[in-house]
Image (cartoon, rainbow, N blue to C red):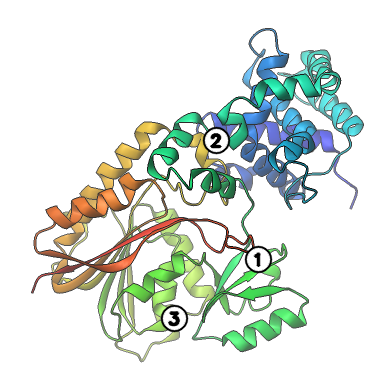
Amino acid sequence: MSKIPLSELLAESAKVIQQVMAGQSLSSLLPMVNDNHRGGVQALSFFGLRHWSRGLALSEQLLSKKAPNPLFKSLLVLSLVLLSAEDFLALDQEGATEVPTDMPSYDAFTLVNEAVKATTLNKKTAAFRGLINACLRRYQRETKELLSKVWQQEEVRYNFPQWWIDALRNAYPEQYPDLLKAANQSAALCLRVNRRQTTMADFKRALSDAAIESVQLDEDALMLTQTVAVPQIPGFTEGHFSVQDLAAQQAIKMLPLQNGLRVLDACAAPGGKTSQMLDHYDLDMTIVDIDERPLKRVHENLERLQLTKAHYPDNDAYQIRSLAADAADISAWYEGQPYDVIMADVPCTAAGIVRRHPDIKWLRRPEDVTNTSDLQREIVQALWETLKPGGYLLYITCSIFPAEGEQQASYLAEHLAGAQRLPALGQMLPLADDKGMIKHDGFFYALFKKAD
């Protein structure tokens, strides 16, 4: 297979990032990229979005007026992100030689030439090849002066929008620099062993035989220490594992689950916690999500993991039903038989998983925190009506904003009728341990019991 020209990858990545800045998610955009280009475009887009603040600040110094159009702006900023990456690395790490694993490596001469070529690949940028060439070469001439100017900005140092920096500083005055730094690192792949299909020992042996290195995190979880395409991992087709972050895997440990319970997994997609519960217990499971498409993914995952009802036809305790419905509108889906356990993995800003989804910090707005908090209350208060007396509800978000975490849990404890708040993990922060390893994403858990 011939090597794909960098100019083509730059042009496609710039278009993808422009669409992100217009409000679309990477997860919806990347599948539309040509199969042969997708890996390269994903790598450039992820790195570009992680360091966008830096390229943007440099572009504002280099352009004498507003960029000619959004696509040119995206291409220029992305090119500056790549051209300045090693220079900023020296400032970030004060001369340390360790290079981030996701850092693209292109010599400056090639990068400038390919960026100029990239302008010719789209009619919206074709007239501005001279402008991008001038900006990039000026950066090369004036690197020290330009870096000195932009490094004064917090958005440049931390690579996040200012409102996000301020929010974390207010919430975590001692930890916010480390949280922001961690969120800009690429995340290792975390897997959960499917207990119904294999054992941790057998799965680790299969990984070792395939020369895939891993670190075991607990009885079911391990983290890969190298990049591997998920379908290429041994046991994928046979359903021996799921991709699931360590923090997400903790949910099952806080619930008093046992065989035969009636369980509701609300806002269930993509189904990681659903499959985890089902590979541990025989449950009467109801899955609710607002959209048919993610529910289809849940069923595809359950089929791969051999966890559908068809795999256990004679087990009366093992039942699965799914409903595409608004969890907050119980009149549309609730049939009147209450649940023993409810998993309320509610919509949130996803502020705890930015290292896996770097577009999140550019898609979110300050008002989103308030809006999602209101929606979470609406959903949980509705679900509470479907919980039987003596039952348990686990409130979950993948956020590190207190409005979606402890503040929300305190509100629910006061406003859910007959609610007793029980011990749970609370706020899990995605911080590096003493070996520099970030073992999990940012999650929040609160457990409530309904009075008998």
Measure how far apart labels 1 and 2 are at the Cα level. Answer: 29 Å
Q: Amino acid at mark 1?
A: Val
**Sequence-wise, which precedes: disc 3 or disc 2?**
2
The image quadrant that residue 151 belongs to is: top right
Q: Which one is closest to the eye, mark 1 or mark 2?
A: 2
Left or right of 279? Residue 440 is: right
Q: Is residue 351 above or below residue 156?
A: below
- Whether residue 267 is visible here, answered yes or no, is yes
The residue closer to the viewer here, 125 or 108, is 108
Measure how far apart labels 3 and 2 are at the Cα level. Answer: 39 Å
Instruction: State the residue at coordinates (13%, 54%).
Output: 414
Place of residue 75 in the rendered image (x, y in percent of width and height, measured from the top left): 72, 27
Instruction: Give the structural element (helix, strand or loop) at label 2.
Output: loop
Q: Residues within 10 Å of mark 1 (few under 14, many from 20)?
A: few
Q: Is residue 138 above or below residue 2?
A: above
Give the residue furthest to the bottom: 314
The residue closer to the viewer here, 431 or 113, is 431
Dot 1 and dot 3 residues touching (CB under 8 Å): no
The residue at which mark 2 appears reads as 160
Instruction: Give the structural element (helix, strand or loop) at label 1.
Output: helix
The image quadrant that residue 166 belongs to is: top left
Dot 3 and dot 2 residues touching (CB under 8 Å): no
Q: Which mark is residue 279?
A: 3
Measure how far apart labels 1 and 3 are at the Cα level. Answer: 20 Å
Left or right of 80? Residue 69 is: left
Place of residue 383 in the rendered image (x, y in percent of width and height, measured from the top left): 20, 59
Q: Is residue 208 above or below residue 359?
A: below
Left or right of 32? Residue 421 is: left
Q: Residues within 10 Å of mark 3 (few under 14, many from 20)?
A: some
The residue at which mark 1 appears reads as 230
Q: Amino acid at mark 2?
A: Phe
